[in-house]
Structures are given as structure tokens and as C-alpha cells.
Amino acid sequence: GGVWVATDGIVNPLAVCTTLARLAQSQGAQYIENCQVHKILTENGRVVGAKTSNGPIKCEIFVLAAGMWSRELANTCVPRFRLPIHPAEHQYAVTEVKPALTESLPIVRDYDGQIYCREHQGGLLFGGFEKEGKPLFHKGVPPKFEFQKLPADVVHFQPLCDQAKYRLPILETAHIKEIVNGPETFTPDGKFILGETPEVEGLYVVVGMNGNTVQAAGGVGRALADWITNAEPEAQLLPFDVRRFIDLHNNQKFLRERMREAVGQHYALAHPLPIEFHSARKLRCSPLYTLQEAAGAVFGERMGFERALYFAPEKP
């Protein structure tokens, strides 16, 4: 089966960013470029400004949207606030020009093969989300990594390449010009992280787009602006609220282990029941855990706690 979405489309990320910036400037927004934020400043549990390479800046509301550098800024804040994100590798391939292709080629998303494909400058661009991801930068994100590239991991990318060729046979004869490898920021449950932090009043976050930055940019910005203005989120934004996490979710070892699985879940087939992760488990167990396990319990995890979902004594 398949679904055709007529409103689906492709945009230039730089053009989107530039357009949104110009529209904001026309309404009075100011931009300061080449200015690095070193620390978020607080007083009595409320944000009051930031320490930057150009000196201190005062503010009443602070929105942290620093991508994979956001967690490091959160750790320097006093009080420190939870921001469980972790970068992982994401690869895609670009082919040489194929004359048979046209700009009307649809974006293809194959959730069985966990791959996507679209037209790109007369050729094809395809990539996907591996079942086992490769976490990055365990000891800190390089300060200027946006100007660098990761080496391509052809072996790790090969299963996605095979799936793409199976779904789109035209790729069998398309010469791959380049395999691009770069970091994307993921969250423990695969959902965005938005909203006001419970630790610091007036401090809002927009992080963890899980590879959907361009798709989410305008809508998330508008939603957060309404959130700040109304002091509470719309109901549909509650699943993304930063307050859903606890301290163990922000643990570096937990994040590194969970990211190996979270990347693959990004393109997993959705199901009405919650997704149960298998990595980074048995962190919070009740005294009854061993008794339930012996009785054939199949466990799920909520807020780090292992709880019996049902009992299957005949389980393998």
C-alpha cells in the first residue's frame, strides 16, 4: 500500500532561513552574527541574560535553539536544566544527473526499508535511518563543526543503499557522486523538545528535531511564539514538552546507548501502542521485578521505571 500526499514538497533550507529572517527583521527583530553564547545567566531561578563573546546581553525571555550544542549550554547554566539530546551520524547519497528524471518526481518515503529519496539537481538524493545508529561526540561537540564533514561510512550505509535500489530500480544504473555524512540531533523518545524549562523561569528550548529541522522550522517557531505569549502550550504540543524528562534521561551514558536505537525508530512503522525501546533499560526496577520476571512478565518502560505490561509464561 502507499499514500500520495499532493502537498508534499522540497525547499531550499538556506532560502527558508533567509526568508524567515527577513520577515522577522521587517517586524523589528535584530540579528547579531558571529557572536558566540558562552553561558545563560540567571537570578533567583529566572533567566536574566547571556554571556557572549560580544559581552553580556540582558533579556526577560531566552529561547535556546542551539542545535547539538544546546545540551552543553544547559550544563553550564545555574541551575542546570535537563536537555536530553545527543548527536548521531546521518548519511545520504547524491547521484549524477539522470536525464530521465524531472522536477515533478515525488518524495518517496519507504518505511519498510527505512529510506527516503527525492530529486536533487537533476539527479537523486537518497538516505535513511539505520536500525542501529552511530552516536557522536561523547566528550563534547566541537565548537565549529558546521564547517566540517564526517568521513563517509560506506559499510554502515550499504543496507540503506540496498533498500533504496530495491524500491527504486533506477538507482541500479545511477552513479553515486557523493555520500554525505553529518550529525543530526536525536532525543530519547524521537519527539521534539519544546517549551519552558521547569528549572529556570523564562527559559524556553527548541531542540531535538530528529532530522526534521527544515520541515519543523516555521511551524515550531510559530507554535513556540504562541506558547510564550499565552504562557501555556496548545494541547497538541504537550507530547513535546521538555518537562516530560527526568534526570536519568539526561545521563550521558543513557543517551549514548539510547541513540543507537532511537535513530532506527525514526522511520519505524507507527503503531497505536507506544514504542518500547530495548536499549538503556532496567534503570529503575521495583522490588517485585524479579518475581514478575520469573512469572513471565513482558516489561515496558515509563519514566525509567520497568513495569509489567502483560504476562506471557510461554514467552521464549
Image (cartoon, rainbow, N blue to C red):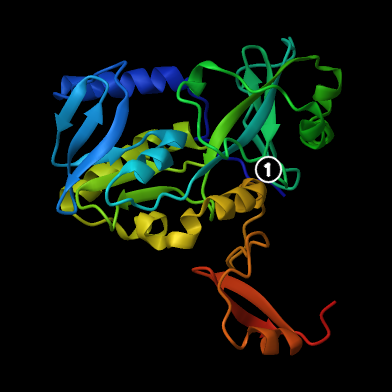
Note whether 218 is above or below 310 in the view shown: above
How far across and how far down the image is residue 140, in percent? 51, 35
In the figure, is residue 255 to the left or right of 159?
A: left
- The relative height of residue 71 versus residue 273 in the rendered view (above or below) is above
Between 15 and 143, the residue placed more toward the observer is: 143
- Asked whether 101 or 174 is in front, the reply is 174
- Label 1 sits on what residue type? Gly
- From the viewer's perspective, tell me whether residue 227 is left or right of residue 160: left
Q: Residue at x 62, y 17 (%)?
A: 120
Query: Which quarter of the rendered picture does the C terminus lie within?
Result: bottom right
* Residue found 62% across the figure and 62% down from its top: 271
Q: Residues within 10 Å of mark 1 (few under 14, many from 20)?
A: many
Q: How many marks?
A: 1
Q: Position of residue 117 (x, y in %)?
A: 67, 30
Q: Position of residue 192 (x, y in %)?
A: 44, 48
177 left or right of 55 in image: right
Residue 240 can be seen in this image = yes
Q: Judge whether residue 262 can be spotted in this image.
A: no
Residue 263, image x, y percentages:
63, 45
The residue indicated by pointer 1 is: 133
Which image quadrant for residue 237? bottom left
- Asked which quadrant contains residue 92, the reply is top right
Q: Nearer the viewer, residue 286 or 264?
A: 286
Residue drawn where x is 65% and y is 16% of the image? 102
The residue sitting at 33% across, 44% down in the picture is 205
Report helix, strand or loop for mark 1: loop
